[in-house]
Amino acid sequence: MASVPFLAIACSACSEQSFGERPWIVDRFDDIKVIRYEVPGFEALPLEQKELVYYLSEAAKCGRDILFDQNCAMNLPVRRTLETIYAEYKGDRTTDDWKALEKYLKKVWFANGIHHHYSNDKFVPEFTESYFLQLCESIPAEKFGELCGMIGEVCRAIFDPALYPTKLNQRAGDDLLLTSSSNYYRGVTQAEAERFYDAMAAADAGNPEPVSYGLNSQLTKNERGELVERTWRLDGMYGPAIERIVYWLEKAESVAAEPQRSNIAALVNYYRTGDLKEFDRYNIGWVRDTVSHVDFVNGFIEDYGDPLGRKASWEANVNFRDSVACHRTEVISANAQWFEDHSPVDPAFRKPVVKGVSAKVITVAMLGGDCYPATPIGINLPNADWIRKEYGSKSVTIDNITYAYDQAAKGNGFKEEFVLRAEDRDRIERYGKLADDLHTDLHECLGHGSGQLAPGVSAGALRNYSSTLEEARADLFGLYYIGDPKLVELGLVPSFEVAKAGYADYILNGMMTQLARIEPGKDVEEAHMRNRKLIAEWCYEHGKAEKVIEWVEQEGKRYVVVNDFERLRALFGEMLREVQRIKSEGDYEAGKALVERYAVKVDPELHREVLDRYAALHIEPYGGFVNPEYEPVIADGRIVDVKISYPADFAAQMMCYSTDYSFLPNRN
Ligand code: ZN
């Protein structure tokens, strides 16, 4: 599970800020800003850890094409055609048409495909098909290679609005597979896929260690029309990219110490065989390893992109411990059992013994796949419920990323525009980052790991509502406890004021400002956004009689304010109890009713107002990152140091990755 930035103040931008002498924001286009992040402490790492970071970082870059192909089968041909034009076109690069094409390409790079990374809608090009074809014709055919025969298809993928309209359709009642453009299922209906995996689950019923069926494969049909899985492994689908990942992981294995060395070996074996039991073995070893200073994620991890919540997108992240900031999460994880025991959920759905909660604050050194350029700010893994229950989970908060967001957002006018009361603005200014960090810690470290299923309930029972409800459960856990006197007692916050800052911002974002990320007329689709809207709207309605949350209109502008923070905290507790019940009992109908009622539909008038006020501030609602670069210093045939540098050119980094880390054919 991953958290994406929730505090609006952490999602905004200003180009005036400095990165030392250099700006934090290196590029802006459409609704996107690209920021860079520093890796403090890298230089001070011992040589073998620098080397380990370097090898793991190389492995983190090698799966980029996999994600493009997972997001849509036409993504690689589209990207490569555009990149060929971008590299080879000798004509005028100052025209509006050219700028529109360049912007489109940047959007494709940023989203790892032709669909928006957050809304999942297909991009609408602001240049014409004839201009595009004219550019193609001006470039020698041999530059396009095999793509030459695909230009027609590439055109349709870019310009035909009816083709691949959305990457991920979650509209109740539709065939979610046939109407989603992701490449996890090919020519398979939702009913067929559900039957296929239900049969697997039935055959495995009662197994206390159920395999995450379908996690690492595409489901399709063979010539005889039978359903078959194409597994993502060394000699299977995505083999050429996996081969490079394995190459660098083996280098990493050679410099890693135990227990990490054995864990990397298990991961390599999983990539070779595609055996999900091996993946579980790796995850268990990984969860137990709380000693390695350098750590990483590399694999098919999160299932947000699959309408059925089964198939995982490829992602990578390399990081090392931020020892100073770790105090906060160490205190939280040391008290994990207390939090579980005092949670407002039905005692039957609490974990009697919380195992192996380990949480830390990390410094990210490299982002890859589904963590790049847009990245989560917190991660809690592994995702398999039985491993979490038996062995616990590892939870991280990424401090250098939230710091970069925060720096990039200073002075952008957001708070003045949307936060009505000066006292709220002051509190957010003072405690916003702490509230945000603690909420992320609690969400990841305890929230996702909390609770248990009733006997016989399967983890997939909530189907297309599971991601939203799971995020809501974790967020509610964090929101409830951020205001608990226990946090003051533990010395993590000075007072309830921190919770007030977090609550005011959360409600504002959930009911209002996050709508800036949605196009007019569209529903809320993304799981984290749905979750925030669900929580905020539910609490608004359930506290309406007492005006716990209130809409205030002033000078023609609407504001949402929290009047009673203590009561709001109690509402978070009540809602947590209900959401945990839904998850524990696998109550699909109740989950569906909650999400459809509170989390999906947008008030068009409010939406228009938010978009207008947001636009006037010139703040891009989404952010992502350029990676640092690592260069080994070699003497006498061996690495004697690794140098880090911070490139500032988004397009150059993308072109470099597409040249040096692109291993898959156009069609997979
Ligand atoms: Zn989460």
Image: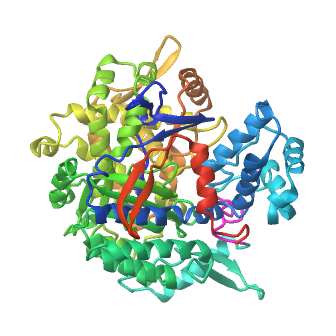
| Quadrant showing the C terminus | bottom right
Secondary structure mostly taken by the magenta-highlighted segment of the chain: loop
Q: What percent of the width, then of the height, locates residue 3?
A: 41, 51
Whether residue 182 appears in magenta in the rendering, the answer is: yes
Which quadrant of the structure image shows residue 251? bottom left
Quadrant for ligand 1 reads bottom left
Q: Is residue 614 visible?
A: yes
Q: Residue furthest front?
A: 636
Q: Which residue lies furthest to the top in this view?
A: 555
Residue farthest along the left direction in this orientation: 489
Q: Where is residue 425 in the image (x, y as percent from the top left)?
A: 33, 22
- Magenta residues, start to end: 173-186
The answer to whether 626 appears left or right of 634 in the picture is: right
Task: Give the x, y percent position of residue 311.
Answer: 55, 69
591 in magenta? no
Q: Which of 55 and 486 is in front in this view?
A: 55
How many numbered marks are there? 0
Q: Is residue 394 visible?
A: no
Between 13 and 539, the residue placed more toward the observer is: 13
On screen, residue 372 above or below 252: above
Which of 625 and 480 lies nearest the eye of the viewer?
A: 625
Measuring 22% from the left and 47% from the top, which residue is drawn there? 325
Relative to 645, residue 289 above or below: below
Please say which color scheme the image uses.
Answer: rainbow
Which residue is drawn at the image coordinates 16% and 43% (left, top)?
492
Residue at the image point whose x is 37% and y is 68% from the top: 382
Q: Percent position (x, y) of residue 225?
A: 76, 84
- Quadrant the N terminus occupies: bottom left
